Every structure is written in structure tokens, then in C-alpha cells.
Image (cartoon, rainbow, N blue to C red):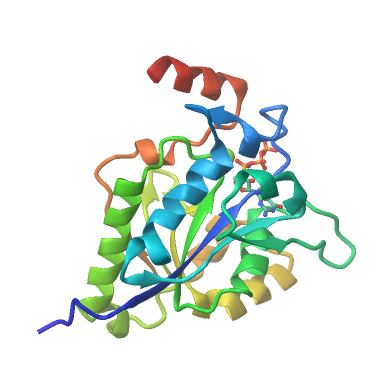
Amino acid sequence: MPNTNYHLALSGIVLAGGLSSRMGRDKALIPVEGVPLLRRVCDVALSCIGEASGKVSGQVYIVTPWPERYVDILPETCRFVREVPLPEESTPHGPLVGFAQGLAHVETDWVLLLACDLPQLNAEVVQGWVKQLQQTRDNGIDQRSPYGIALLPRNPKGWEPLCGFYRRQCLPSLTEFINQGGRSFQRWLAQHPVQELLVSDTRPFFNCNTPADLEQLEIQN
Ligand SMILES: Nc1nc2c(ncn2[C@@H]2O[C@H](COP(=O)(O)OP(=O)(O)OP(=O)(O)O)[C@@H](O)[C@H]2O)c(=O)[nH]1
Ligand SMILES: [Mg+2]
């Protein structure tokens, strides 16, 4: 019988180090229904991870070169990872490097990676994904494919890299890819087996990149 009762060790990483150049102002701070986007995403992560979630233990990390911008809008339970430039480069260096710098702090086997610009993400949906991760592991699929590096939703163009689960074990491969100059999630993921996270609704992946996206959101709400 699969054991569905044992503890899941899961951390969260929220990326908030982009330039928001298409939006023209820091997306992380834009209020949606009165709450800054970054805070909304962190609250979703915290609802699945740590004390509030019961059986799932771990930390939620915010990866950004500028923690001081966000310290006042986030709960104290979140931990900041201050991103540093790679040698001979400056920040922002893109989400793949931000993820690698965050992952270096993670102590759990699995991590939930989220972008900060996901206004439609909600706790119920992500808690369902965490259950799927738990079932994958409890059914032994986890052990049978020990080199599967991630459990991610698919979209018509590839994987949804900023909205799913990764194994901490993927850090050496990620570091090597980055050291060779790689900066694309899709290219890195294409080199490894990835399991599909099954989703019934694609709305949670709607990411708010432009003022027009924001307007569309306001019309919907
Ligand atoms: N920590 C970190 N996060 C990043 C970096 N680049 C992008 N991100 C985050 O990755 C997510 C998706 O990025 P985009 O939607 O392209 O956001 P962006 O780079 O701020 O926006 P544009 O400048 O318009 O491309 C967002 O949560 C960004 O904050 C980076 O260099 N470091
Ligand atoms: Mg985006």
C-alpha cells in the first residue's frame, strides 16, 4: 500500500528580480484587489508550505537583488535571498540564474517555484498541485524515475517553468548549464526528463506583463 501519510518537505521560491520593462513599473508592487502582486503570490506559497499548511514543511524564499523594496509588504516568515551578479555580469540576469541562487538555500527535497506576476494564482489551486506532488511521490513514481528533475504544467510551447515543482537535486545540472552560458529554462529543461503536472485550468498561469494585461485583469474582476 502506498504510504500517503508521511511528511512532504517542500520549500517555495518566488522570483522578484525582473526589470518589469514591459509594464513600466515594478510589477511586484502593483496592487490587485488591494494587495501587491508579490504579496499575493507569497501568501499562496505560504498557504501550502510551513506552519499554515500542516503536513508540508519548509521555507518560502523571495529571490531579488533589492529586498529593501519588499520587506514592508511581506510577512516576516518569508526569507529574502539577495541576488548577486555573476562574475562580469550585472543583475538582472534572468529568472534561471535567480532560481539557481535561491535553490542554493533550499534544504528540502522539493521546491515550488513561482513568478511574482501571477494574479490569478490561488491557494486552492496550488494546494491541489501539492497533493499531486505528494501522490506522485507516494505512488513510487518518484523513486522509479529518480532523475526526473521537475513536475511542471505543459503549455502549447513547452513547459510552464515559473509555476511548478523542482527537485533540489537539479542544482548541479543547473549550475553547469549556467556556467556554460545557458539562460533559458526551456533549453535547460529539454535536457532532462520532466513529469507533467496535470492542470484543468490554465488561468493561474496568466502572467501580467504589460499595462494591457493589467487592464484585461481589471475588466475580468
Ligand atoms: N530573481 C530574479 N527574478 C527575475 C529575474 N528576471 C526575471 N525575474 C522574475 O521572473 C518572473 C518572470 O519574468 P518576466 O515576466 O519576464 O518579468 P520581467 O523580467 O520583470 O519583465 P520584462 O522586463 O517586461 O521582461 C518575474 O517574477 C520576474 O520578477 C532576475 O534576474 N532575477
Ligand atoms: Mg511574466
Q: Residue at x 62, y 39 (%)?
A: 28
Q: Is residue 20 above or below residue 24?
A: below
Can the viewer see residue 60 in this picture?
yes
Residue farthest to the top?
Answer: 219
Seen from this angle, which residue lies furthest left?
A: 1
Name the residue nearer the viewer: 113 or 160: 113
Image position, residue 5 (x, y; %): 20, 78
Front residue of this view, candidates 47 and 86: 47
Can you see residue 159? no
Q: Is residue 167 left or right of residue 132?
A: right
Ligand 1 is found in which quarter of the picture? top right
Task: Identify the residue shown where x is 60% and y is 49%.
Answer: 74
Front in this rendered view, residue 139 or 25? 25
- The quarter of the rendered structure image containing the N terminus is bottom left
Residue drawn at the location 68% of the way across and 29% of the way down: 22
Residue 186: percent from left, percent from top? 53, 56
The C terminus, quarter of image: top left
**In the image, is 200 to the left or to the right of 101?**
left
Give above or below for 116 relative to 101: above
Q: Quadrant of residue 103?
A: bottom right
* Location of residue 116 in the rendering, given as x and y in whole percent from the top left corner: 56, 45
Tell me: residue 72, above or below residue 90.
above
Which residue is located at x 74 percent, y 44 percent? 69
Task: Pick whichever, 136 or 186, lies toward us.
Answer: 136
Classify residue 30 by image quadrant. Answer: top right
Number of marks in picture: 0
